[in-house]
Amino acid sequence: HGLAHEITGRHSKTMNVSMSDAALSARYDFAVSVVQQAGAVAMRHFRRSDGLGIIEKGPQDLVTAADHAIDALIRNAIQSRFPDDGILTEESGGDISAQVWVVDPIDGTGNFARGIAGFAISIAFSLNGDTRIGVVFDPVAGELFVARRGHGAFCNGERMRVSTTATMGRAAVEAGYSRRTSSRDYLALMARLLDGGCECVQFGSAARGLAQVAAGRIDGYVEAHLFAWDVLAGLLLVEEAGGYADPFPLEGDGQKGLPVRACTRGLARQLQEAMNGASDPLDKMS
């Protein structure tokens, strides 16, 4: 989830821009179409025997030729169709504006680069700081997760609902890890989740993990530090599937990255307590 380029427009003001339902519908249809085109590009690169053009941005932080190809495809398509909209992507940065697309060309590049089928393409559209459209596409599974604010969340046309799980002892929770936070803090979080009775998983893609929460397959997703392109689309999926998702503002602290919690409503308080962690279980072990 590395920050490849400095985000410009850090002091931009969020303007109050109005947009018709027809204009939002056009953007939703566009997002659904372009994310599937991007998925086709990803699959042409995935598991290629001649290599992926892998570049190491930092420790365990990879980028591939496919990331750049998908970034260019989506960016060019947006600029051609909606030239007045802003664009912010993981690989090429951009500006935060009142109407802006927020894109992660491949979320889960570490998996992708190793030939592991655990990645997704994430596209969100934000209006006046509010995510209105979110699409996450898992091209290996052929699963297209989509949501529009106030219209519900769907996977391949079937409405999604979060699970009814309300206790840690019955919950499966993905606890994502970022090297931007300490391993000790992460291990302490895992200990609190496990001590609380959770089954913990780690799939390596926040966008895909959030989609699994929305689909009711797992019950929550937590991570100490993520960027907007990692999560905006997935957080809307969870909200529109009836779940709880922490706010993720594009301006202010959101530009530096924030903690993320998305889950069933019954687990929200328990997962917050696990993330806050008044006592550190590791201290008892030392």
Image (spheres, rainbow, N blue to C red):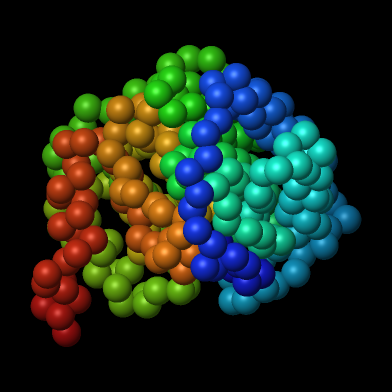
* Quadrant of image for the C terminus: bottom left
Could you tell me residue 138's position as x and y percent? 60, 36
In this view, the residue in front, 156 or 20, is 20
Instruction: Give the side of residue 177 with respect to residue 116, left or right.
Output: left
* Quadrant of image for the N terminus: bottom right
Which residue sits at x=15%, y=49%? 270
* Residue ranking furthest to the right: 50
* Residue ranking furthest to the bottom: 286
In this view, the residue in front, 241 or 26, is 26
Which residue sits at x=77%, y=64%? 54
Which residue sits at x=15%, y=48%? 269
The reply to whether residue 124 is in sight is: no
Count of residue discs: 0
Could you tell me residue 255's position as x and y percent? 49, 64
Instruction: Give the side of residue 205 with respect to residue 160, left or right.
Output: right
In this view, the residue in front, 39 or 25, is 25
Tell me: residue 253, above or below residue 119: below
Tell me: residue 197, above or below residue 212: below
Which residue sits at x=55%, y=30%? 19
Could you tell me residue 66's position as x and y percent? 78, 52
Q: Quadrant of residue 263?
A: top left
Q: Quadrant of residue 210?
A: top left
The reply to whether residue 254 is in sight is: yes
* Residue ranking furthest to the top: 158
Could you tell me residue 155's position as x and y percent? 51, 23
Instruction: Give the side of residue 209 with respect to residue 7, left or right.
Output: left
Tell me: residue 246, above or below residue 56: above
In this view, the residue in front, 78 or 37, is 78
